[in-house]
Image (spheres, rainbow, N blue to C red):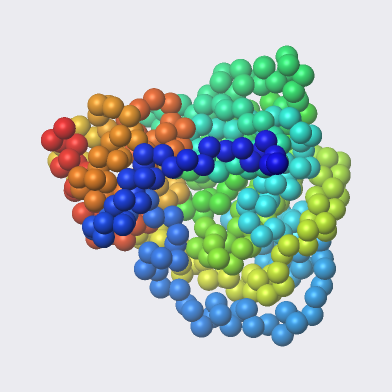
Amino acid sequence: MFSRRTAWNLSPNRYSEALEEHRRSGRELLDLTASNPTTIGLAYREDILLQSLTHRGALTYQPVAQGLLSARDAVAAYNTEMGTRVSADDLILTTSTSEAYSFVFRLLCDPGDAVLVPTPSYPLFDFLGDLNDVKLVPYELVYDHGWQVDFESLRSAMQPTQTDGTRCRAVLVVNPNNPTGSFVKSHEVTELGRICAANEMAIVADEVFFDYSLGEIVPLTLSASTEALTFTLSGLSKISALPQMKVAWVATTGPEALKREALARLAVIADTYLSMNTPAQLGLPTMLEERHDIQTQIMQRIRTNLAELDTQLATQNLCHRLAVEGGWYAVLRVPVLGSDEELAVALLCNTGVLLHPGHFYNFQGEGYLVASLITPSWEFAEGIRRILRFTGRR
């Protein structure tokens, strides 16, 4: 009765079973996987945000496929502040980056076509690929004093698609990557543009965490790329820590003729759904402006937790963290005495600390745990203390 695209294994795994049992028991839980910024104790300017949703214009329906011009102007101004010029005419508003991915995949791919995706990276891509009948082919990020694109792996990932008749339509880049926190470097942007232009492929750049740079490098946005057709995705979920407002966008850049045709087709896709709600669009300029205050709080939390992590790691020599350049997460390298899932379950059961195992993000091999740097600082410090005490006893 059901489609093959939704034939997922929905059986709970050992990790989810252990978490459910822990919660049912009522025992203390130190959650170091925090990803919802609205539940971590940030001080939003509530009156200003709520007032932005009461615009009288919300009572009039304006079915603009790309999104209201006032909202797109605000996003264009944001891009200018971030150092890149993106015209309001080059923007399509969507209700989420997930919807933006769907629009772009539908634009580029026929059923069975391929998109290259980085590994490690966020597991949501598997579901987005299935739902849009797109084949995801992994290419590797490798770690050597920092993360970098393995271009040999990327070129190898392109080969099977060329020999079995499947078309490879795009390379997906997460900038900075989730969870590695690594930004794409200047020479990588150049090489990606060259490869994609030569093979009639597009770049799909997820930059939802772009604002959260730790300052060790000057981040480069893929929206400044001109050689290949490029779709840069972002939204309020991370920029203003407002995932519930459901406002995101796609910026289309690259060779002019390709860009114009892509935007014309995207406008038809957007017009088919008209999913953006008017109050959120009218409130978008205010919500974007509020990012300054909320990002200051988040960056302070990230830096405080990262410093605490480094202080505690310095007291032992079994665990260490990998380099992080931006984003909300830190990757811990831990002794390998079994699978990452087994270790995460053991930590939960024995210490009450919840971390994500590395396989959740498709790390190659065992010995990786992922911690959220936006966790409330007292909880983060105590959680790391328990983790190091437990791993030291194993």
Task: Tell me the quarter of the image containing the N terminus.
Answer: top right
- In the image, farthest residue toward the front: 1
Image coordinates of residue 291 in percent, x first then y, are 52, 66
Query: Which residue reaches farthest top?
Result: 163
Determine whether, in the image, residue 346 is placed left or right of residue 120.
left
Which residue, as the protein is rendered here, is positioned at the far bottom? 56
Q: Residue 315: x, y in percent?
A: 14, 41
Quarter of the image for residue 258 reads top right
Q: Is residue 337 above or below residue 283?
A: above
Point 64% across, 41% down: residue: 6
Judged left or right of residue 198, residue 340 is left
From where the camera sits, is residue 55 visible? yes
Q: Is residue 321 visible?
A: no
User: Total of numbered circles in the picture?
Assistant: 0
Q: Quadrant of residue 7?
A: top right
Q: Is residue 156 left or right of residue 376?
A: right
Q: Nearer the viewer, residue 294 or 101?
A: 101
- Please identify the quadrant where the C terminus is shown: top left
Q: Is residue 72 left or right of residue 239?
A: right
